[in-house]
Image: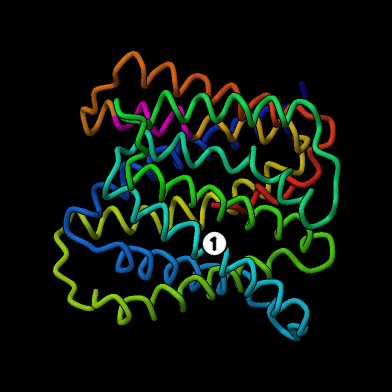
Amino acid sequence: MNMKRGLAIGGLLLVTIIWGGGFVASDMALESMLPFQIMTVRFLLAAVLMGLMSMGSLKGIRKEELRAGILMGIALFAAFSLQIIGLQYTTPSKNAFLTALNVVIVPFIAFLILKKRIPGKVLLGAVMSVVGVALLSLDGDLRLGIGDALTLLCAVGFAFQIFFTGEFVKKYRATVLNFLQMATAFVLSFLSLFLFGETDFQVNTQGWLSVLYLGVVSTTICYLLQTASQKYVDETKAAIILSMESVFGTLFSMLILHEVLTPRMILGCGVILAAVIIANLSETSQTEEGAVESR
């Protein structure tokens, strides 16, 4: 393993650690902030920072790039809003593992839209993920809690964002798409503040620090670090590494929030993680190449 590839793998692992901490940061921010308040500040920070860093690329944005970036931003907004609203009704560890299912869902979207064949390993991963979700989330009476249901929908949102990104980065400039999707997510979050009556900010210090982490570290820095690392690690291996995000999300929930996991929850988490890895081992994982910009 050459030094650049070793550093790239280390960079991707650092991204998963940061994202894992993001689930805890979101949970802490929710103690004094409402969901769309968090998203508005997070995406404002990300849009401003990405705009400043890619200012030279933003000249002469084409209509096609604008349309693509906005579409990605809509999917990103839908995913994050469902994720953080769901987090109000479930635990950070469940939220992390259910979100990770987006990787399994992507090939099915590609099949529906582009008629791409679904590999056998993806089908196996999908079946395993259903079993894992049942173990992790279903109550004794086999009902799915509202928080877990919203998080599953959030995984679908992230899957669409990954699919769109995978298609559009082949045609348009990544820096422009990055900025446009963050700006779109900010505008939609800002409008939602008024739509859902969340305009009254009463945030404590912990809330501001948490959302600062989400906007600057978990969004902006992770995008830059991941993009640089992906130059030296092939897509499939990178996706497997990034699936560790859910593991770190659970570890941070236990260490910082003192969340207690039951044996059944641990088994469910293990099955979901195995499903994500098996799906990523597929030889035809081209649709997941946009995962580098999915968070």
Identify the magenta region.
246-253
Main secondary structure of the magenta stretch: helix
Q: Quadrant of residue 148?
A: top left
**Vertical order, 122 against 153 (above or below):** above
- Tell which residue pokes out farthest to the top in this image: 263
Decide if residue 89 is on the left or right side of residue 242: left
Q: Nearer the viewer, residue 156 or 277?
A: 156
**Magenta highlight on residue 264:** no
Q: Considering only vertical position in the picture, is 235 above or below 270?
A: below
Callout 1, which amino acid? Leu
Residue 280 drawn above or below residue 174: above
Q: Quadrant location of the N terminus?
A: top right
Is 247 magenta? The answer is: yes
Residue 270 picture location, percent across and down: 49, 19
* Mark 1: few/some/many CA within 10 Å (<14, 14-19, 20+): many
What percent of the width, then of the height, locates residue 277? 64, 26
Which residue was labeled with disc 1? 76
